[in-house]
Each structure stands twice: as structure tokens, then as C-alpha cells.
Amino acid sequence: MKKIVVPGEEIEDENVRTHVYRDNGKKYSMIHGVLYKTEGYSKIIPLTHRYMPKEGDTVIGIVESVKYGGCIVKLNAPYDAFLETREDYEIGDVVSAKVESVSEVKDIKLGNERKFHGGEVFDIDPSKIKRIIGKKASMVTMIKEKTGSKIFVGQNGRVWVKDGDIEKVEEVMRKIEREAHETGLTEKIENYLTGDK
Amino acid sequence: MKEKKLMKKGKRLDGRGKEDLRDITIEAGKLKRADGSAYLEWGGNKIIAAVYGPRECFPRHQRSPYKARLDYYYRLAPFSVEDRANPKPSRRGIEISKVSAEALSDVVFLEYFPNTTIDVYTVVLQAQAGTRCAALTAASVALADAGIPMKGLMPSCAAGKIEGEVVLDLSKDEDQCGEADLPIAYLPNKDEITLMQMDGDMTPKEYEEAVDLAVEGCMKVYEIQKKALKEKYRQFNEGGE
């Protein structure tokens, strides 16, 4: 079962633990999201949110400034991250990296970096990233096959695309972003890509 | 001898009863570039609200490692009132921005985003009394639309006194010729009043009556706010799977 909830709506389900707060023994939703309910398992998924860096995420960033011993990277998040590296980077370079640590005042350190050469980057809503990747990466693999592009999806809502039909990839991802809350999406997108809508 | 004008046979000038609101419509997610937005029409008021952030806080000395800062901008568009409104921030605009920011700061979980700012912009495109309440109502929908964690939606509504009677949601003539105006913002699930201002005179009894009436009005606005947010994803098939 699923249901749209708004901030302040009372949640009676005991299993929901994220995106809720307690007050006077009652539970309320904190965000505008969808409450999914299956047997013994329920959760609230936000319909939209800003990306908050989390340890272990793989993200795509853009180098903002180069310092001694590393560079500052923009992550499409409220906070900038620091990438410690000995390699030469220039302002505007696109890198993928892993979030190594996030301190309590949100000092973010990156590692395991890889530089992208060429290609295009665009931003999408971070809450829709799971839909773009799909179950066991089914959606993104399908898009790669159909368009012949190289695609890399960062957890922070950034997508890097190179070769193939880049415009088509962006168009499809915007469609997924718009229709992420609907069911049977992979099938729909497959039909959309092969042409019979 | 003063002539009675604002009330006739228990009805007001625009045909409303004492406890009726003007027509309200809210649409969430109107603006593409903003992180969250809402458009509101409340009688003759037309207001657009946009939310950006949380983003890095500048200037640096204003950031706090404990919580985010919430900035609220209330502006009257130059064409919103009868004479041209000077676009520079007025004394009134700055005051409304301040009290509204304080009201919203009680509602948003600011401690989740240390060292950041959340910007809430409201622009009154057309004004017809009760704009601070209307702007706050729109702003709270826009904040929810931006995916910012909140204690709840915060409706806002005014009550007032015209010709000795306590009424809900004053119109322009009632606001100008009436005796008192009492805007409040209210957090329904915690039963808290987050903003209260008063203009004019009321007896303690009238004041209590007005607060109760305004809270009742807020509950009606609250339902409209909830509907606006749910309406945004209306193709969504509830209950399925």
C-alpha cells in the first residue's frame, strides 16, 4: 500500500523509523513523501530533497578551486567537499569520487577519485536517482544498451554521459524524474526508447 | 452620526458571513528553477513563494555550526497596490520579513543543516488585505515542496473586529475601516501559535474570541495546503501495488 504524506501528518505505523519525529508519544511525518507499506516493513520516501553527503556514496563533483595538496569540489549539496590529491586538476574538471568521511559540522573528505575526460554532465533530483539506476541497475543498463552511451550516475543527483545519443539520454532521464512515482516505469521507458509509445 | 456600512443583516460587504474565509487556491511546484515553490490566490491576493537551499551561508560570520539560518523576504511588487509601491524594502516589509522568519524558524528542523542558509522568497503580485498571512501560508507549502524537514505545515489567517463584531479574514475595506486586525500563524499538530500581531483595540473577551476564530480559520487553510501538496502528484495511484 502507498500513500502521499505531508509534513505534520500523523503516522500510525510502528515500523516507520526514518523521516518522522515523535511528540507526546505520537509520530508525525517530517517531509512531503510517499509512505510505502508492506507486511512488517514500512518506510517514507521523500518526493524531493536536497542531497546530503553520506559516507560511502559515490558522487560526481566539479572542481571549484585548486589548493595546495588538493582541491575543493562542488557536489550539488549544501556543503563543498575537499579532495586530497597529488594529481593536477583544473577548475571545471569533472571527477567521480567516494565520500570518505563526513564530520558533524559537515566537513566532507573525498577519495578514490577518477577524472572524466569529455562528455556532458547534468543535474537531476537526488531523490529520483534510485529510479534512474533501477533494481540491480536494470534501468541504467537498459538506457546504456539502447542509446549506446557511456553513463555514470552519482548518488548526488549528477549524471555524466559520453558518446551515443546524449540528448536522448537527458530526455529519458527527465522523463524518469517526472514519472518516478509511477509503477511499471522500466517497461514504459523501454517502450519509449524503442519508439512504440 | 456614523453610518453603518460594513455589516448588513449579519452579512459582510462581499456577502460572506462572519466566519467565512475568502476563496483560496494554492498550487505547489509552480516554478521550475526554485527548489520548491507555491502560487497562492486568496480573494484578491496573488502571491508567489519560492524556496532555495539549504545552501552555504554567506557572509561567513552569520553561519552557525548548530543550525541553519532562515531568511524570509516579503516584498510588495510595485504594481501590487493602488499607487505604485516603491520597490525598495519598506519599514513594513522588513518587519513582516522578520516576524515571518521567526515563525517559520520554529517550524523547520534547522538543526539538520548546520552552517547553511535557507532562503524563502515571497512576492505579492496583487495585494488586497491579509498579505502577510497569505504569504506565510504559501511559504510553508513551498518549504514542504522543497523537501525540507518540518514539524508540520503552518497555516496562517487573520481575525478582526468590524463595527463591534469579531469576524474572520478581513477584506480590504474591512481592514481599512474596521477597528482591529489580529493575524496569527498556527501549527495544528502541536497546537502552537507561532506568529501573532495586533493592530487596533479589542477588549480581552473580544480578543479571546478573535484568537479562537483565527485558529478555526487556520484549520480550514490547513486542509487547502494539504490538498495542494497532494494535488501536485495527482496521477499517483494511491493504495496500489
Image: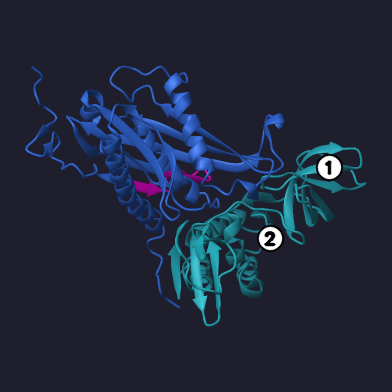
Instruction: Give x and y (percent) for residue B154.
Output: 43, 47
* B131 relative to B187, above or below: above
Kind of residue sitting beneath label 2: Ile
The answer to whether residue A169 shows anywhere in this view is: no
Residue on which the image places disc 1: A71
* B241 relative to A177, above or below: below
Residue at the spot 51% in from the left edge and 36% down from the top edge: B101
Chain for disc number 2 = A
Q: Which residues are magenta?
A: B26-38
Residue at the spot 11% in from the left edge and 27% down from the top edge: B5
Quick one: label 1, few (<14), some, or many (20+) residues within 10 Å? Answer: many
Q: Quadrant of the N terminus of chain B?
A: top left
B27 in magenta: yes
Chain identifier matching the cyan colour in the rendered picture: A
For label 2, the SS is strand
Kind of residue sitting beneath label 1: Cys
Q: Which mark is residue A151?
A: 2
Instruction: Give x and y (percent) for residue B43.
Output: 25, 38
Of the chain colours in the picture, the one used for chain B is blue
| Residue located farthest toward the front when viewing the structure as drawn | B204
Mark 1 → mark 2, Cα distance in angstroms: 24 Å
Quick one: label 2, few (<14), some, or many (20+) residues within 10 Å? Answer: many
